């Protein structure tokens, strides 16, 4: 392998992909909570912040309180 070739990338496992997506959702939620507050924030706003459909959020979290509990 020459130095101008990129290193081969390792495929993430299903568990790693799930964890990565949950982290993306959490980061988007933190931004939305900062602007709207927890109470007024919606799943749709979180999905929009991360550029996904709201169904994506529900695939990884039951509701917005579950997103907060993810970190705690």
Image (cartoon, rainbow, N blue to C red):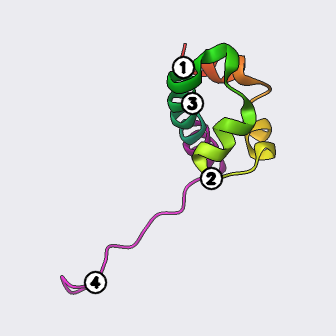
In this view, the mark in front (1 or 4): 1
Q: Position of residue 13 (x, y in %)?
A: 60, 52
Please tell me which of labels 1 and 3 falls first in the chain. Answer: 3
The secondary element bearing badge 3 is classed as: helix
| Quadrant hosting residue 72 | top right
Please tell me which of labels 1 and 4 falls first in the chain. Answer: 4
Question: Which residue is tagged 1?
Answer: 71
Please tell me which of labels 1 and 2 falls first in the chain. Answer: 2
The quadrant in which the N terminus is found is: bottom left
Q: Give the residue drawn at x 51%, y 34%.
A: 27
Alpha carbons under labels 3 and 2: distance apart:
13 Å
| Quadrant hosting residue 59 | top right
Question: Which residue is tagged 3?
Answer: 32
Q: What is the magenta range? A: 1-22
Alpha carbons under labels 4 and 3: distance apart:
40 Å
- As drawn, the label of residue 5 is 4
Please tell me which of labels 4 and 3 falls first in the chain. Answer: 4
In this view, the mark in front (1 or 2): 2
């Amino acid at each position: 392998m020459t130095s101008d070739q990129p290193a081969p990338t390792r495929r993430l496992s299903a568990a790693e992909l799930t964890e990565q997506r949950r982290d993306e959702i959490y980061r988007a939620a933190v931004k939305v909570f900062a602007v709207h507050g927890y109470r007024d924030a919606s799943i749709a706003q979180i999905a929009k912040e991360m550029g996904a459909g709201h169904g994506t959020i529900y695939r990884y979290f039951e509701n917005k309180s579950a997103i907060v509990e993810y970190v705690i």
